[in-house]
Image: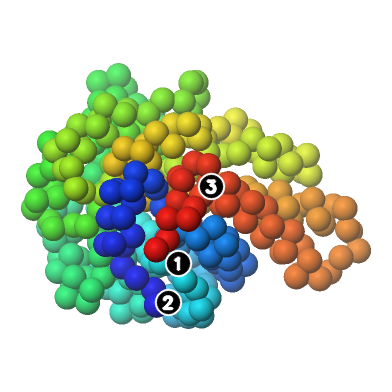
Amino acid sequence: MELQNSKKILHDALVGGYGVGAFNFVNMEMVKCILDTAEAKKSPVIIQCSTGAIKYAGADTLVAMARAYTKNMTVPVCLNLDHGKTYEDCKNAIDAGFTNVMIDASSLPYEQNIELTKRVVEYAHARNVTVEAEIGVLAGVEDEISASDEDAKYTNPQEAYNFVQATGVDSLAIAIGTSHGPVKFKGEPHLRFDILDEVHKLLPDFPIVLHGASSIPQDMVKLAVEYGAKLDNAKGVPDDLLKKACSMAVCKVNTDSDLRISFTAGLRKYLSQNPDSIDLRKYNGAGMELISQVVGDKMDNVFCSSNKAN
Ligand code: G3H
Ligand code: 13P
Ligand code: ZN
């Protein structure tokens, strides 16, 4: 099957009340085990590359790998540019063959975010590529935020509504309390479901994206640490909160850190137990096995996207 834009994948998820995993990859090992798992689970899937991944591996190479592995697949697959920062980032990705792009102008003033997003939408839609944008701030747990700033970092539902009308964007990432990386919460994990609910009421047919949605599985953290990793205070979004978000309007669940941690755990364990191994297929394979396990568990039990590919 050819790579698809996100329109039908996210629409089906919204109507069906499930989420679609958007998994980051930077190399053959990651993309192969994500896609093999999606096919085995009969789950739609989004694979995505950051601008850093593109710098690392090259856009043409990443697109070629995605196309080669999806050629004989039966489930829908979308290839997304994750966190494009400029018009050129998005244009280059579209020209290379990405089928969805994210323009992340959330750090710009609201009006400038609208202007830049509109320009990207115009270029993308003329080429059958869909666009994700973002409003609100995904503050890291270590970011200093004063009490008065506390509300400002979350997405304002009315602004989200106005933004979607003004830009014609296809999906929107909102800030409801998640953040990127392995340390997401100091205390009890908490998401602002009231904001998600409000956005959904204003935009009932519109798919919402959750960034910073890794759950940081503690068994993987423990394994990685047992074999020498340093992952202090690693804490993610609990599965029950992710599951609830997917049953509401969250259709795309951005997940990167969980794959990094599980691959690292498998690799470290293998190399530690097989110090004489110099076979990349063996130790990379051990990392891939754990990524597949984590991705499969999410599809089955958290996003509930298994058997939803039609
Ligand atoms: O949202 C960020 C993703 O995890 C990508 O991270 O820029 O280090 O590739 P990266
Ligand atoms: P995590 O760091 O929680 O995996 O978030 C990934 C992400 O949002 C990619 O855009
Ligand atoms: Zn993100």
Q: CA distance from mark 3 to mark 2?
A: 23 Å
- Eyeballing the image, is 295 above or below 121? above
Q: Is residue 58 something that shows in the picture? A: no
Give the alpha-carbon distance from disc 2 to disc 1, as whole Å: 8 Å
Q: Residue at x 32, y 34 (%)?
A: 176
Q: Secondary structure at mark 1?
A: loop
Rendered view: 184 above or below 89:
above
The residue singled out by tag 2 in the image is 1
Q: Residues within 10 Å of mark 1 (few under 14, many from 20)?
A: many
- Tell me which label, 2 or 1, sits earlier in the chain: 2
Report, in whole angstroms, how far the alpha carbon at label 1 lies from the one at label 3. 15 Å
Relative to 281, 216 lies left or right: left
**Tag 2 and tag 1, C-beta contact below 8 Å:** yes
Work out whether residue 27 or residue 15 is closer to the camera in this orientation and state it: 15
Tell me the kind of residue under disc 2: Met
Q: Say which residue appears at 25% left-offset and 65% top-offset.
A: 130
Residue 259, given in percent of the width and then of the height, sits at 58, 52
